[in-house]
Structures are given as structure tokens and as C-alpha cells.
Image: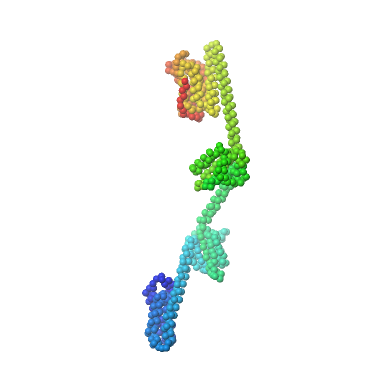
């Protein structure tokens, strides 16, 4: 089948076959003219040659057509029309010969223009068709009035899940899988592209639920509109559908996230309102503090959001807290950490309020946001409580001081009674009583020196005890070694001090003969979970059968049971005596590491 070559003349050179075809058109025209001469003599020779030139121009191009026309013109003029060409005056044949070249030129010029216009139209149509086919979605054009499918995009199969079948009428659209909100499938006229064809409706962004042949559901966004002639008649309709399933899912997730965020924000707002907390925000670049209505009300201002510069907010902070608050904010910005502080701020009425503030730097370092609460009443209660505790401590110190003085008075009275005793046994008993009263007074003195009136520095208490005991018998050296920093609860420390007093008194009295020199050592140390107190002397030691326990031994045993301690005695004649008191006090020891202390 012959096809016109609507190509631009400059796009390529004619091929030899095209020249041959053009000459064939001319030869066929001459032959046909010869046949016609039998049936229509006198017919013009150029009548059939001119259509041959036109056909050569259409199917072979301008240059082959010119060649064919020139060859036919020469053949007719030289072979058939020579007698008429030499005749004179001018005749009809001569006129035909003269008019044929301009006629051919006119026809070829018109043919060339038509070919160029047809070529441009075909190029534009091809470009439009290619652009339409590459639309990133399902796109189609339906022809009016029946709705026959003219063209579709190559992405239609991907979006719709199958190739679009041949649509000969709009009713065929019912075979597709669009769904109404109630689950009904679309009829042919329900589709936007058909509505645009039938009624001229313009559809923009209509959402359609679509079931693909494999059963999967997709969300489509559809656009459609009519194509009209200049007189307004609908020639066709164009429709495009885009798969927005992922976008719809993202929108749903975003809506769910927004709903959750809104719920969290509402709960947070309720919690903030219930806690009477104010919100603040520092715009780092602008250097502005933005305070909400609650914070403004705390500062004694009208309950409405306000903005303050850094200098204005700094001026509201009490001078005693100003530098600390600024240093903490600078550190927070440098470390991108958490801001936390309590400060005093002056209200618009001039009163001072205690505020607790906490904030955090946003990840983009653009702002610091936080909350603030009024803790003035709490601080006032704490200050009142601290004042009451100070008053209690003063009273307890005073009570201990009075008890100590009373015990010292009792010890003085007993000492006076010792000087008036008639027998050695009475003087000895009174002296023991004086030592025990003095030990209790020494324990109260240590308790009075403690910071909390509950725990006692045991090494200092024993050092004082050794110093007092050493003063009673200067001929015997008293050594005290204790771990500095070991503190005990008073309920354990006081009985332990009394035990030490009894053991030291017994060593001073019985270890060495009267008037001789010697040494008595007291040491206390921590051994794992136990506290060991050892009283040792280098005296005569125990000899002979065990004597009946005296009052001192009974006191030691009673006090040891009271604090859960065990007392072990090792003594040999001429090798001295070592008494070890072991007590489990791991929970009560506060600072078990220290230096040894030696009492003179």
C-alpha cells in the first residue's frame, strides 16, 4: 500500500526508488494518454500528465516530481507536438505547452506546503500522544458521543492492575472496579471521565476507592474534563487517575498521630492547669522570653501571654539568685541539657515569690521551653520547719548540757562522800560510782557535740574517756587508737562507752601494783561487718581460781547484752590481760575509714 511521505523536505534526500517511481508515474500517464487518443482524439496531452506530477509530489517528494514532470513534458513536446509547436500564429497546443510548466510549479508548490503542514500536524499529534502516554498515572481520552477509547497512558496497567480493554461505549466502563462508599461498584456513567463526556462536568481531585483484579484495594485521585470545539460542542473527554494509596495511608497515620498528640496535649494542659504551672519559652535568636497567662499571673500581671527581653526578666529575679540563674542557663545552652533552678522573683506588686523552673533545649537549638511553679508556701513551710528544728536542737543541747552538769554535780557529791568514807570497801564502791557517773557524763558530752543528736563520734568519745582515766593514775600510760570518722547510734555508743569505762577502770586498778608504771591500751577498729574494741594491759594477769564476778563484771555483761555484743577475755599470769568486745554494727557505721588517735 502506498503511503504519502509527509516529511520535511530538508529531513532527507530522495532515494533512487522514489525517482524511479516518479518517472513511472510519468510513463504511465503518457501510456494512458496514448490509449485515450483512440477513444477521445483531440484531448489535451497534458491532462493526464499533471495528475501524475501531483501523485509523484505526494508520494515521492518535490524533486522526483519535478524530474517526472520535466521528462513527460519533454517527451510530449518533442515526440508528439513538434508539428504544432512550429506552426504560426500561436495555437491552442502551443498555449498548452507554455502553460504546463507554470501549472506544474503551482501544483508542486501547493503540494509542498500541504506536505509541510501535514508533517507538522503529525509531529504535534505524535508528541501529544507520547506525552499523554507518559503521564504518571492512568490517563485516557474518550471520543464523543459514544465514549470510544481513543488513547491511554502506558501507566494505566500499573495503576488499575490490568490493561484497559477496548472501550467501544461509555457503558463498557462498568467493567472496571471503582467502588461507592457503600461498597457498590460504579456504573458506566458514574466514572468522572464519562460524566465529563456526557454533561461537561469538570472533576478535580475526586477520591475513589478502587478494587484491582487481584482483589487489592487502592485509593485513586481522579481528574476529568471535557474537550470542546470552538462552538462549545463536546468532542471528547480526558481523564486521569493517580494512585494515592500511600499518601492516603500517610494522611491517616498523620491524622491518628495528630489525634494522639492532641489527646496528649489536652492531658498535659490539664495536668499543667491542675498543678498551677506556667509555661515559658526562650527564643534564643530573638533573645525574648514568652510567658503564658499562668506565668504572667504568678508575676502579678494580667493573665495574658506576655513577652519580655532577657534583661527585663533578669531584672525580676532577686539579686541574690540572679547570677546563679544566669550561669545555669548558660550551662544549659552549652551542654544542651536540662535547666532546673529555684529562685526568688519580684511581682508587679513588689512582693517576692519563690519559683521552681525546669526547661530543656529543643534539638534544633532554636528555643528553650519549660514550666514554672510557685513554691512560696512550700519554702515558707520549710523555713518554719528548719527554724523549729534549730530551736529543738538548741533545747536538746541545753538539756544535754544540764544533764551533763547534773551528772558532774552527782560525781562531785560522790567524790566528796569518798573522802568521808570510813572503810576501804565503801571508798572503793563510791569511787566506782564516780567513774560510772563520769562515763555517762562523758557520753552526754559526746552526744552534745554531735551534729544531729542521734549519732556519736565514737573515737573522740573514747579519746576523751582515755584522757580522763589517764588523769586518775598518772603513773600508767593510757593509749587510745581509734579509726577517725566511725560514728555510732547513741543507743549503741553510750553503752559501749560505759563498757570501755568499766574495762579501763578495772585495768587501772588491778593490772599493776600500786605505785608501779605500766601501760593500758584501748583500740577500736572495723573488721568486716563487726566493730572490735580491745582493752589490753601488760600487767600481772589473772592467777588462781576464778573469783566471784564483781559489780563491774555484771555491768559489762548487762551492757553487752543490751547492744548485742560479745565479750572475750584472754589473760595469763605475768602476760597481761586482753578483753575484746565484738559488736555487729555494719548498718550504723557511717565513715569507717580514718586515722588513729592517741590520747596522752
Residue 226 placed where, x, y %?
54, 66
Q: Which quarter of the rendering shows the N terminus?
A: bottom left
Identify the residue at horizontal 56%, vertical 45% (top origin). Answer: 309
* Residue furthest out toward the top: 422
Image colouring:
rainbow
Q: Nearer the viewer, residue 31 or 100?
A: 100
Instruction: Provide residue 78's location: percent of width, then percent of height.
Output: 37, 84
Where residue 372 sits, quadrant-wise, is: top right
Front residue of 382 and 430: 382
From what the image shows, is residue 447 above or below residue 376? above
Counting labels gives 0
Q: Residue 30 is drawn in which quadrant?
A: bottom left
Q: Residue furthest bottom?
A: 88
Q: At x 41% / y 71%, what residue is drawn?
A: 10
Question: Residue 42, how many percent across, how many down?
Answer: 43, 87
| Residue 174 shows up from this direction | no
The residue under the point 49% across, 42% down is 335
Amino acid at each position: 500500500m502506498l503511503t504519502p511521505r509527509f516529511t520535511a523536505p530538508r529531513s532527507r534526500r530522495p532515494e533512487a526508488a522514489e525517482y524511479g517511481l516518479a518517472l513511472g508515474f510519468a510513463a504511465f500517464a503518457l501510456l494512458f494518454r496514448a490509449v485515450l487518443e483512440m477513444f477521445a482524439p483531440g484531448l489535451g496531452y497534458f491532462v493526464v500528465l499533471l495528475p501524475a506530477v501531483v501523485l509523484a509530489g505526494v508520494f515521492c517528494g518535490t524533486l522526483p516530481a519535478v524530474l517526472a514532470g520535466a521528462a513527460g513534458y519533454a517527451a510530449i513536446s518533442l515526440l508528439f507536438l513538434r508539428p504544432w509547436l512550429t506552426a504560426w500564429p500561436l495555437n491552442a497546443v502551443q498555449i498548452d505547452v507554455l502553460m504546463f510548466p507554470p501549472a506544474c510549479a503551482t501544483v508542486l508548490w501547493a503540494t509542498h506546503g500541504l506536505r509541510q503542514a501535514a508533517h507538522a500536524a503529525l509531529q504535534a499529534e505524535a508528541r501529544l500522544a507520547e506525552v499523554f502516554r507518559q503521564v504518571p498515572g492512568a490517563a485516557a481520552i474518550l471520543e464523543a458521543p459514544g465514549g470510544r477509547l481513543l488513547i491511554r497512558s502506558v501507566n494505566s496497567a500499573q495503576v488499575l492492575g490490568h490493561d484497559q480493554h477496548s472501550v467501544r461505549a461509555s457503558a463498557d466502563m462498568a467493567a472496571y472496579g471503582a467502588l461507592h462508599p457503600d461498597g457498590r461498584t460504579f456504573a458506566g456513567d458514574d466514572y468522572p471521565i464519562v460524566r465529563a463526556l456526557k454533561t461537561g462536568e469538570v472533576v478535580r481531585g475526586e477520591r475513589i476507592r478502587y478494587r484491582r483484579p487481584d482483589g487489592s484495594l487502592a485509593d485513586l485521585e481522579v481528574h476529568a474534563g471535557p474537550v470542546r470545539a470552538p462552538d462549545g460542542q463536546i468532542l471528547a473527554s480526558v481523564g486521569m487517575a493517580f494512585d494515592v494509596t500511600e499518601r492516603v495511608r500517610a494522611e491517616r497515620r498523620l491524622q491518628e498521630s495528630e489525634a494522639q498528640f492532641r489527646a496528649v496535649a489536652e492531658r498535659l494542659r490539664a495536668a499543667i492547669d491542675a498543678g498551677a504551672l506556667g509555661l515559658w519559652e526562650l527564643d534564643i535568636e530573638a533573645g525574648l522570653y514568652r510567658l503564658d497567662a499562668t506565668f504572667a499571673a504568678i508575676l502579678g500581671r494580667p493573665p495574658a501571654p506576655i513577652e519580655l527581653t532577657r534583661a527585663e526578666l533578669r531584672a525580676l529575679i532577686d539579686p541574690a539568685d540572679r547570677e546563679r540563674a544566669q550561669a545555669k542557663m548558660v550551662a544549659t545552652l552549652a551542654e544542651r541539657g536540662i535547666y532546673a533552678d529555684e529562685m526568688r522573683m519580684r511581682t508587679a506588686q513588689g512582693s517576692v515569690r519563690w519559683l521552681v523552673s525546669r526547661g530543656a533545649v529543643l534539638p534544633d537549638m532554636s528555643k528553650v521551653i519549660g514550666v514554672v511553679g510557685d513554691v512560696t508556701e512550700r519554702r515558707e513551710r520549710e523555713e518554719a520547719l528548719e527554724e523549729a528544728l534549730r530551736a529543738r536542737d538548741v533545747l536538746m543541747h541545753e538539756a544535754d548540757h544540764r544533764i551533763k552538769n547534773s551528772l558532774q554535780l552527782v560525781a562531785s557529791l560522790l567524790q566528796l562522800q569518798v573522802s568521808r568514807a570510813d572503810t576501804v570497801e565503801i571508798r572503793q564502791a563510791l569511787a566506782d560510782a564516780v567513774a560510772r557517773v563520769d562515763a555517762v557524763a562523758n557520753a552526754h558530752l559526746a552526744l552534745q557535740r554531735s551534729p544531729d543528736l542521734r549519732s556519736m563520734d565514737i573515737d573522740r568519745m573514747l579519746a576523751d574517756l582515755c584522757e580522763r582515766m589517764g588523769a586518775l593514775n598518772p603513773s600508767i600510760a593510757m593509749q587510745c587508737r581509734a579509726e577517725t570518722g566511725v560514728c555510732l547510734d547513741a543507743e549503741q555508743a553510750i553503752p559501749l562507752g560505759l563498757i570501755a569505762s568499766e574495762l579501763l577502770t578495772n585495768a587501772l586498778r588491778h593490772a599493776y601494783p600500786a605505785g608501779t608504771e605500766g601501760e593500758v591500751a584501748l583500740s577500736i577498729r572495723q573488721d568486716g561487718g563487726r566493730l572490735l574494741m580491745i582493752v589490753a594491759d601488760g600487767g600481772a594477769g589473772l592467777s588462781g581460781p576464778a573469783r566471784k564476778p564483781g559489780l563491774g563484771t555484771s555491768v559489762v555483761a548487762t551492757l553487752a547484752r543490751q547492744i548485742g555484743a560479745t565479750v572475750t577475755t584472754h589473760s595469763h599470769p605475768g602476760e597481761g590481760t586482753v578483753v575484746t568486745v565484738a559488736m555487729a554494727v555494719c548498718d550504723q557505721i557511717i565513715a569507717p575509714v580514718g586515722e588513729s588517735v592517741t590520747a596522752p
